[in-house]
Each structure stands twice: as C-alpha cells, then as structure tokens.
Image (spheres, rainbow, N blue to C red):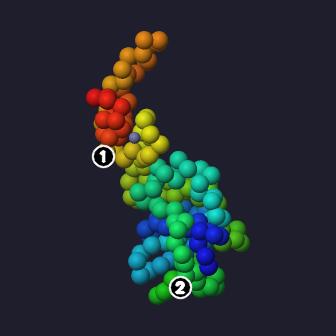
Amino acid sequence: MRIGKILDVVEAPDIVGKAMLAMGTTPVPHMVTPDDATVHWLLPRGAAHRRPWPWARISRYVRVLTSLEELGIPGTDLTDGPGPHWAYPEVWGGGHLADEWLVEDLAVCTLMHLGQPAQRCELCPEPLWAEDGVRVVLPRSPLRTFPSDTVRVHTQCARTQGLT
Ligand SMILES: [Zn+2]
C-alpha cells in the first residue's frame, strides 16, 4: 500500500496502543509491529493536517508519517504475533481508518504514559517543550497596558526578537 498518496500513518510506542485499547474509546484497530515495539494507525490522506496544533503538541510521542514509500499492512484477520498484526478494540466500529479526532485519545494516553504535551511558543508556530524555552519580558506597549508582561518562548525566538 502506498503511503503518502493514499494514507497518513500515525506511529507511536506500543505502550500507547495498549493504553488506547484499555481506554476503549477509539473504535478502530491499530497495527502492532512487535519487532520495533511500535503501533500504527491509518488515517485518510491529509487528515492529521486538518488539526495541526493538536498533533504538533504531542509530536514528541506520536509521529504522523506521510513520506514513507511503503508500509507492510497485515491481513485484517491477522490478530496475533510474532509478526505485524492488528489489535482490535473491544467495541469495534467495523472500519480500519481512524480520523483526525484520533488525536484526542492519543493526547490522553501520551500524557498518562509518556509525558507532558508541548505548549505554544508565543512567537512562532513550533511546539515548545517543557524543558525548552525562556520566559521573557514583553516590551511595554505605548498603546495599552497588558495584564501580564512575560511570555514563554523558544530561546532562539527570544534572541531573534531581541527579547530578554
Ligand atoms: Zn518559537
């Protein structure tokens, strides 16, 4: 199956797959690849990009792949290892494609099992991770008074804007 032309593929560590099954609110199955301890969900092409920020804020834990040439997809009736196979949720909706709202459940599972999501940098669209960034003082606006005058931003963004 051609990835990039047809599908987005969401890749996560296998613990996230187990957590998603335990939570039980995602009605589509995922693929399990025991060899590299990863799981994959299939989405229609471009689905993840319809909601860029929710995906970006967990991009450290969950990757959206769009440039892989090929991904081996096991037969849908293959539900056990040792090779790649499908893991079906207890309540299965009947399909194999997730949608962009998959990210809501992924956000809960990555928070509980892997760590904090990124925050927004106030100066650029890239995710700002907890251990990165600096708190900088905004220059006073001559036009109005801001209730708070510091923001958290990437170190590099602060430098570029001349903020300290
Ligand atoms: Zn930034």
Q: Position of residue 153 (x, y in %)?
A: 37, 37
Q: Quadrant of ligand 1?
A: top left
| Residue 147 figure quarter | top left
User: Looking at the image, which residue is at 41% across and 57% down?
Assistant: 60
Which of discs 1 and 2 lies nearer the camera? The answer is 1
Furthest residue in direction left, as rendered: 164
Q: Is residue 71 left or right of residue 131?
A: right
Q: Position of residue 103 (x, y in %)?
A: 56, 56
N-terminal-most mark, 1 or 2: 2
- Regarding residue 108, the answer to whether it shows in the image is no
Neighbor class of circle 2 (other Cα within 10 Å; few <14, some 14-19, many 20+) is: few
| Residue picked out by circle 1 | 131
User: Looking at the image, which residue is at 58% across and 83% down?
Assistant: 74
| Residue picked out by circle 2 | 80
User: Looking at the image, which residue is at 38% across and 54% down?
Assistant: 115
User: Looking at the image, which residue is at 59% across and 57% down?
Assistant: 48
So how many labels did they put on this image? 2
Mark 2 falls on what kind of element?
loop
The amino acid beneath tag 1 is Glu
Residue at mark 2: C-beta within 8 A of ligand 1: no
Q: Out of 147 and 77, give the one closest to the viewer.
A: 147
Q: Which mark is residue 49?
A: none
Mark 1 falls on what kind of element?
loop
